[in-house]
Amino acid sequence: MENRSSTITVLLVLLLLFANYLSAQTIISQFDFNSMPLTNATVGPNGLSADPDATTNGSEFLIGANCGSLKGLDLVVPNTGGVLDQPEMGMTFAFRAMEGFASFYKRGLFEFYIRNSQIYINWAVDNGLGGPLPNGPIPTGYNMPADNQIHEYTYLYTMANGMSEIFADGLLVWSFDGPDGRPLYWTGAGNAIIGQIMDGNCTGPGVLDYAYLFIPAPLPVEFVSFTADLSGQDALLNWETTAEYQNDFYTVEHSHDALDFEEVAFVPAQGQAGSNYYQAEVPALTPGTHFFRILQTDLSGNTSLSEVRTLVLEPEEGPQITVWPNPSQGQITLDPGTIKGPGRVRIVDMRGSLRADFPLEGVSKLDLSHLGPGMYIIQVVAGGVNRKSRLVIE
């Protein structure tokens, strides 16, 4: 029961994240099929025509009479003002699967449909020379549930990364990684058709609850590269981004187990066109395994994560320093071990600013409470030896 509850919780979180993502999109065409005529749009241009046998039960489209294998909604959506000529596109259909073949959306070389109850997709992108680069028809391997219930199916093409994705009830069920930066090929495609050959096997219940097309919200940032390297006890992190959109700042996060992460550095976004290069230093790592990732936050508060990078710091030979208690209230004891003076004890904050400086000779008790709560680096330098330790003041 516990495993089942955990699975349900994960699914609910994924559904919520996907719903939030869809809510951020720009809808360009929407039909709810709540009243006649079915050609009336909630958003965008009205349809030009629909099958005369198509009707509504007040909530969903259905075939009310004279149904058959060639019947369907056949809703013709005009390309008014080029509204359908988008370089990237998303579309969502709330559909009750009661037939083996039905077409959600068809326009030119593009078709999103089911055959033998399996979702298929056929699309084309620009080949870089102004012509089409066809993809498909591709069987996705996802079979629709025959449970007589309405489910939501979404197709999404994102131009920046060339990804085509299909979601069922908010869960990713298929993806295809194509060439980056290629717009969808709609050249000369004209109008679109929604609900072609879709009659619900003449069983009477509603078939299509709603249908809408949307422009995907631009990704706030695209990570091109992210590296982590050791320099003594310090971690040097470098990352490159492109296509930054309303990006606000980056947070470097660190973990010892790749599960629980904490913030260790803050880097403002550059927000320039083209490539942006960033660097952060995380000092005074302890021996062991360290995991790092970059959390990006945009101006709306939405976030995205980089991949995780791993560093392993082996114990150093030679003298070490010890600081306790840690965390502390600012009153600490420093044991430099076998490190002998003359030398210096320096206290540096996480932004690299020197906050205190003491001679090493005779130092054992330090009062650092005046620095205030936060994370600091204690550095002992003497006789060619440089040792660091991290200190948390609460």
Image (tube, grey):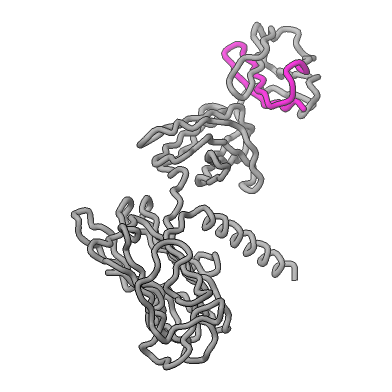
Q: Quadrant of residue 243?
A: top left
Residue 151 part of the magenta segment:
no
Q: Quadrant of residue 19?
A: bottom right
In the rendered structure, the answer to whether residue 39 lies left or right of residue 125 reads right
The residue at the point 53 percent across, 38 percent down is 299
Relative to the observer, which residue lies in front, 152 or 333? 152
Is any part of residue 111 visible from this angle? no
Relative to 344, residue 125 above or below: below
In the rendered structure, the answer to whether residue 231 lies left or right of residue 193 reads right
The residue at the point 66 percent across, 25 percent down is 389
Relative to the observer, which residue lies in front, 299 or 286? 299
Relative to 95, residue 24 above or below: above
Is any part of residue 373 visible from this angle? yes
Relative to 335, residue 142 above or below: below
Relative to the observer, which residue lies in front, 320 or 135? 135
Q: Main secondary structure of the magenta part?
A: strand
Residue 388 part of the magenta segment:
yes
Residue 200 at x, y percent in the picture? 48, 86
The residue at the point 38 percent across, 90 percent down is 69
Q: Residue furthest front?
A: 36
Segment tinted magenta in the rendering: 368-394
The residue at the point 42 percent across, 59 percent down is 28
Residue 6 at x, y percent in the picture? 69, 64
In the rendered structure, the answer to whether residue 187 lies left or right of residue 266 reads left
